[in-house]
Amino acid sequence: MTVYEKKLLKILKAAISNRRLTVYYQPQYDTATNMLVGAEALARLVDDGGTVICAEEFIPLAEESGVILELDWYVLEEICGFMHECRERGHQCSTISVNFSGKHVDEVDFLERLCTTVDAAKIDRKLLVLEFTEATVLGNPEEMEKLIEAVRAEGFKVALDHFGRKYSSLTFFRDLKIDIIKIDKALFAGNCQEESERWMLTCVFDLANRLNLITVAEGVETREQLGFLRTCACKMVQGYTFSEPLPQEQFFVVCSQTSQMAPMEDILQQQPLSTSRKMLLDAIFQQYPLVMIANLTRDSFIVLANDNFSAAMPNKAGSFEENLRGGAYSMHEDDRELFLNTFSREALLDAYRRGEKCVRLVTRQLGSDGVYRKTETADYFVKNSASQDVLVVIFCRNI
């Protein structure tokens, strides 16, 4: 260790021994309502001169020296004391998250000590979330998976912290039995302005939500980030957009406020482009249960929405011509030839070259209930700046 590191470690040990280590609370808010729903507990070290030493300096040192075990238990005890006092004052107790090192896998009495500490303060175990970083889990995956399962079996919640900072893998979603996934700010460092960043975030949140995981975005600092995270159905956020980490007494005040809400802003002003597009798509999908995009140049298509439109369910993607013929099978026999002639690739490309904006046709389509209904199909030619291919957006609805 350097001279500074030795001095810092000595300060840290003394702060733990003398109960002078401070715990701050970073409020967490429901993304949709701005309601306070929890907080993350963060250790703060203050030297003899009153200077606050950032966690990035002393946490790695605590990990390396093994002092992190003592530090984690100290913070947990402080949290339990805070939650007990919060209840005694008559305030609603929010869920509190606490960081735990992966080194606890080697503690034989870890579970016993965890349960004893929390139960002694008469804290509902469901209100406590243990956070383990993705790096910690990957460093010792088999043992960490066992520890996480044991913790959850005792009634505690578990969060995977810093997802996206460095090591992110889809195996976390498949294999790890967790309750909460915390999305690291590294995944939206571009302020949600780049299309690739927005698509990536959308996919991450969609997958997490489909697996019934609570999603928390950490380090949210701008209105643009908050606005886009709302469109992704991110459940909770924490960061300077709402509040910086607060000392205990200030967090007491926040918990005691009857509304427990951060100021609401117009969602259209926070993220006009992405929010407006999302609302537009929602409106379109209400009107058109089947929406596809086709590349006529390359004979391909993808389905954007398909809400049990017909008896012949199309694939999600594939050959445009093959899908066209498949759709014709569920059509009234008197309409099939007209349908195929109107919407073949060759016919549509000819229409495009003539300068037409849309090709539209009404036919009779067999529904999944065995009843024929009049169906409108409308193909709109569209442009994409990234390609010279001829593209169409296809809308289908019963009329």
Image (tube, rainbow, N blue to C red):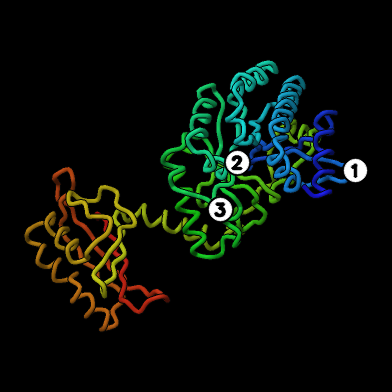
Q: Is residue 22 visible?
A: yes
Q: Amino acid at mark 2?
A: Asp
Residue 132 location (% of width, % of height) = 59, 38
- Disc 3 + disc 2, Cβ < 8 Å: no
Q: Disc 1 designates what residue?
A: 50
Q: Farthest residue toward the front?
A: 1
Residue 320 location (% of width, % of height) = 22, 65
Secondary structure at numbered mark 3: loop
Secondary structure at numbered mark 2: strand
Give the label on residue 334, or none.
Answer: none
Q: Disc 2 designates what residue?
A: 30
Pick the front one: 88 or 204: 204
Pick the front one: 99 or 220: 99
The Cα–Cα distance between marks 3 and 1, rounded to whole angstroms, is 34 Å
Rendering quarter of residue 384: bottom left
Rendering quarter of residue 314: bottom left
User: Is residue 292 rendered to the left or right of residue 311?
Assistant: right
Instruction: Please tell me how crowded label 1 is: few (under 14), some (14-19), or many (20+) other residues with Cα within 10 Å.
Output: few
What residue is shown at x 37% (from left), y 76% (from top)?
387
Residue 242 location (% of width, % of height) = 69, 47
Q: Quadrant of the C terminus?
A: bottom left
Work out whether mark 3 precedes mark 1 in sequence or the reverse, and give the earlier one.
Answer: 1
Q: Farthest residue toward the bottom?
A: 354
